[in-house]
Image (spheres, rainbow, N blue to C red):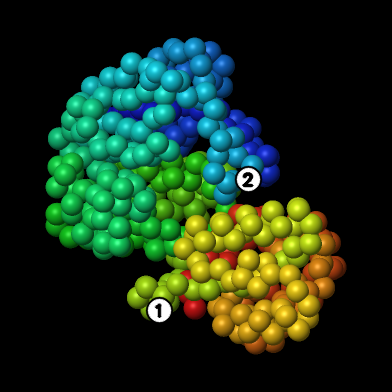
Amino acid sequence: MTIHVVGGVYREYCVHPRWYDVFGSAGRAALAIATTGSPVVLHSYTVEATLGVISEKAAWLDCFEIASTPVKGEVSFKYLHDMAVPEVVGVPEVPHAPIRVTQQKVLRFGMLEGDAVVNANWAVYDPQNSRGATPFRANGSKAAHLALVLNSWEATQLTSMPGASPESIASILARQENAEVVVIKMGPRGAFVWTAAGTAQVPAYRTNRVWKIGSGDCFVAHFANAWMHDGLSPAEAADVASRATAYYCETRGFATKENLSACSFSPVALSVEYLAGRQPQVYLAGPFFDLMQIWMVEQAQANLQDLGLKVFSPYHDVGLGSADDVVAKDLAAIVESDIVFAITDGLDAGTVYEIGYARALGKPVVVYSERQHSEHLKMMEGSDCTICTDYTTALYSTLWEAVKL
């Protein structure tokens, strides 16, 4: 039976890595579901240009249809890099009239330019919305069988329960929304799956490269398809979604069922200490002698913290000074840290020394370098540093190494 996907179709820009396309949450999810062979109808607000791009993508898929609601202005997301907070352009001051969908199976996303009122037998709801998460039933939507898929921040916002356990939050959400299933995405911990019959923890999977834009859309799309169309249990559906998301992060492509059968991703390893609440510390090594270098250090500090890591940054925590002022403090921080994230473009002497000092102590080091020839990184490679040429991959490699210590 057809899955009806309702949500945003948006234009997406990313400066680096370069990305310019039309997807949005609903557009990407509908294409991901159709790629598995399941029939899909996409319901969205579109302008002529975005409808044309999505129609071209749909032309390759026999099971994909579009139910467009024409509007005059398009919404765009502009990213400096794929871990950056986007600039959102084109959101109308007055929201468009709601899209109404009455069907057996519906995947609904939160939207910026309007809303979707759903009446379904089976429904999956992802409240993603930069203005704040909204309950499924707040606009009059109805579903006999409802699954909520949301991240930890959205779950906390909807329940006003910061610091509560996932099980407590999920049970509250289920009661508030009369939901049969609640899936809370928890970063490296994977996904927590709640049903009245019990709970399950589904792992996140490690990849060789990471592309973040749209990864959450792929998760909910594959969950919805596996649960509503293929009839898998919520935990089984969440595991399919987690593996399909890993495929998307590594390839920027949508997985077929054959792709998923052929792929073998390893779960992210989690130490007992991390699961008990310990926050790993990262030493942020890198030069900070001009504006470009300082900007990069600022970005890395913020992004590592957003991933849930404690960050020691010499620039922020020690500052500039003489050798007598800074060296002992920096080296002591390397000893106290669990892992080093090193920005090595330019091969700053201090950063190279910090890498060597950390490796001599047996500390894992993730090296982020886009411009250096492999010959210049030979000592780092030969001393078992993890070398990454992509910024987001370097950040996630640091996270995955840290949480297993």
In the rendered view, does 132 fall on the left or right side of 263?
A: left
Image quadrant in which you'd find residue 278: bottom left
Viewer-nearest residue: 196 or 95:
95
Of callouts 2 and 1, the N-terminal one? 2
Q: Is residue 3 visible?
A: no
Numbered label attached to residue 81: 2
| Mark 1 element type | helix
Residue at point 29% right, 37% down?
134
Residue hosting label 1: 273
Residue 127: x and y in percent read 33, 39
Q: Is residue 157 visible?
A: yes
Viewer-nearest residue: 36 or 254:
254
Residue 266: x and y in percent read 48, 65
Residue 92: x and y in percent read 45, 20
Q: Amino acid at mark 2?
A: His
Viewer-nearest residue: 244 or 166:
166
Q: Is residue 276 above or below residue 226?
A: below
Numbered label attached to residue 293: none
Residue at point 23% right, 28% down?
139
In the rendered view, does 195 fall on the left or right side of 272?
A: left
Q: Residues within 10 Å of mark 2 (few under 14, many from 20)?
A: many
Image quadrant in which you'd find residue 7: top left
Q: Amino acid at mark 1?
A: Glu
Residue at point 39% right, 63% down?
189
In the rendered view, does 256 fall on the left or right side of 21?
A: left
| Mark 2 element type | loop
Pick the quarter of the image with the N terminus: top left
Report the number of numbered marks: 2
